Structures are given as structure tokens and as C-alpha cells.
Image (spheres, rainbow, N blue to C red):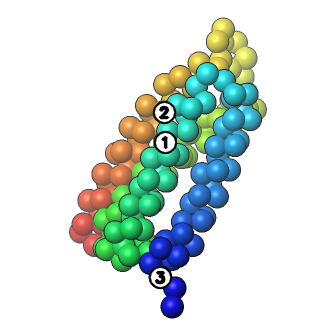
Amino acid sequence: MIDRTSLAVLRLLPVLLVILTAASWFAVVEKDGPYLLRNLMPLLVLLVLALITLYRGGGKWSGAGMRMPLGTLGFAVPALGLSVYLHFAYAVNLNDMFSHSQFPGRVFRYLPLYTLGAGGIGFAIGWIVGRNV
């Protein structure tokens, strides 16, 4: 039999892979800029939420009900989606969004606040939906 910790680690691997891929891509796009560590905070929060979800579920995503899994998913979609989208827009200069700006790299200054806020709202919605399931 596989114990609880092994199951949690095995089920956490896809989340960890997505987080590491996003973090390395953020570093490439921002070119190790001054706001890189700030922009990694939503990824760290996502990892912590996934760990808590797996711990409370005994190594399974839905072992303790659907509140935490849907809350974690509700956090991940807007937080990760918004951050990845804005990094993509910056990388390809989508619709000349950054070419006429005096300091285009400052778009990443407050991005973690927006992504954590959007993720918090998504978490709350997922938590409420999970409570009613």
C-alpha cells in the first residue's frame, strides 16, 4: 500500500510542474527584473493551497469534501491565468501595448496584488460552491 505522504507527493507533481514552468518563464520574460520575486508570490500561494488541500484530504484531492479542491481551483484559474496572460502580452508586445510606454517593465510592479485579489475572489467562489455540493 502507498501511504498518505507518497500519495500527496505523487498528486502534487503536476501542480509543481506547472508552477516551476510558469516561474521559469516569468524569469525569462522579466529578464530577472526587480519585480520577479513579487510575481512568484501567487505561485507560492497556489502551492501552499494545493498542499493544504492534499493534507486535509489524506493524500486525495477530494478526500475531505469539495470546499478546498474547488477553492484551490478557483484561486488557480484567475491568479495563474491573469499572470500568465500579462507575461505573454509583455513578451510579444501584444497590440503594441508596451512599445510606447516610458517604463514598460513596471507593469509587473502591482501585478501580484491584482492576481492575489482575483485569486482570493476565485477561492471564495469555489469555497462557497464546494460547500453546497
Mark 1 vs mark 2: which is more N-terminal? 1
Q: Find disc 3 in the rendering and name its residue.
A: 3
Question: In percent of the image, x 53 and y 22: which residue is there?
Answer: 109
Question: Can residue 58 be seen by looking at this rendering?
Answer: yes
Residue nearest the observer in this picture, 31 or 88 = 31
Q: Based on the displayed image, in which of its 4 quarters is residue 36 positioned?
A: top right
Q: Find disc 1 in the rendering and name its residue.
A: 42
Question: In percent of the image, x 74 and y 35: which residue is there?
Answer: 28
Residue nearest the observer in this picture, 75 or 11 = 11
How packed mark 3 is, by other alpha carbons closer than 10 Å (few <14, some 14-19, many 20 or more), is: few
Mark 3 vs mark 1: which is more N-terminal? 3
Q: Amino acid at mark 1?
A: Pro
> Along the horizontal axis of the image, is 16 left or right of 88?
left
Tell me: residue 58, above or below residue 67.
below
Q: Residue 112 shows which numbered tag?
A: 2
* Residue lying at the far bottom of the rendered structure: 1
Residue 65 in the image: state x and y as whole percent. Answer: 31, 73
Question: Can residue 11 be seen by looking at this rendering?
Answer: no
Q: Estimate the spatial distance between the alpha carbons at disc 2 and disc 3, rounded to whole Å.
A: 36 Å
